[in-house]
Amino acid sequence: MIDKFRYQAPFGIFGKLAEMLFLTQYMKKLLLTRNVYLKQAAEAGQMSAI
């Protein structure tokens, strides 16, 4: 499975600053955590519940 995820913070220059400071790292961690959960659910046969 391949996730393609695009985002852009609102609020112009302030949004870009937020992306650089913390948002990009937060989103990477969110997707990695989601991938771990999906992998565990698939291996346990629980994908129909998702």
Image: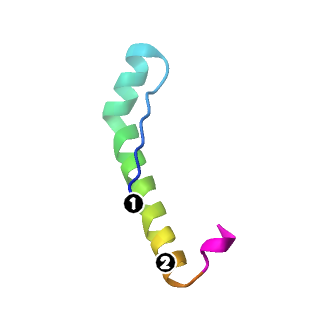
What residue is rendered at 49% in x and 82% in y?
43
Q: How is the image coloured?
A: rainbow
Residue 26 in the image, given as x and y percentages of width and height: 41, 47
Please tell me the numbered disc located at residue 32: 1
Q: Report the residue that reaches farthest toward the bottom.
A: 44
Looking at the rendered structure, the secondary structure element under dot 1 is helix
Going from the N terminus, do you reach mark 1 or mark 2 first? 1
Q: Is 10 on the left-hand or right-hand side of 46?
A: left
Query: Hey, which quadrant is residue 46 in on the image?
Result: bottom right
Looking at the rendered structure, the secondary structure element under dot 2 is helix
Residue type at mark 2 is Gln
Residue type at mark 1 is Leu
Query: Circle 2 is placed at which residue position?
Result: 40
What residue is rendered at 52% in x and 76% in y?
42
**Of 2 and 8, the residue lying toward us:** 2
- Main SS, magenta residues: helix
**Of 5 and 23, the residue lying toward us:** 5
Q: Report the residue that reaches farthest toward the left.
A: 20
The quadrant of the rendering that contains the C terminus is: bottom right
Q: Residues within 10 Å of mark 1 (few under 14, many from 20)?
A: few
Q: Residues within 10 Å of mark 2 (few under 14, many from 20)?
A: few
Classify 40 as above or below 10. below
Residue 21 in the image, given as x and y percentages of width and height: 33, 35
Residue 31 in the image, given as x and y percentages of width and height: 43, 55
The quadrant of the rendering that contains the N terminus is: bottom left
Q: Which residues are magenta?
A: 46-50
Q: Is 50 on the left-hand or right-hand side of 35?
A: right
What residue is rendered at 31% in x and 32% in y?
20
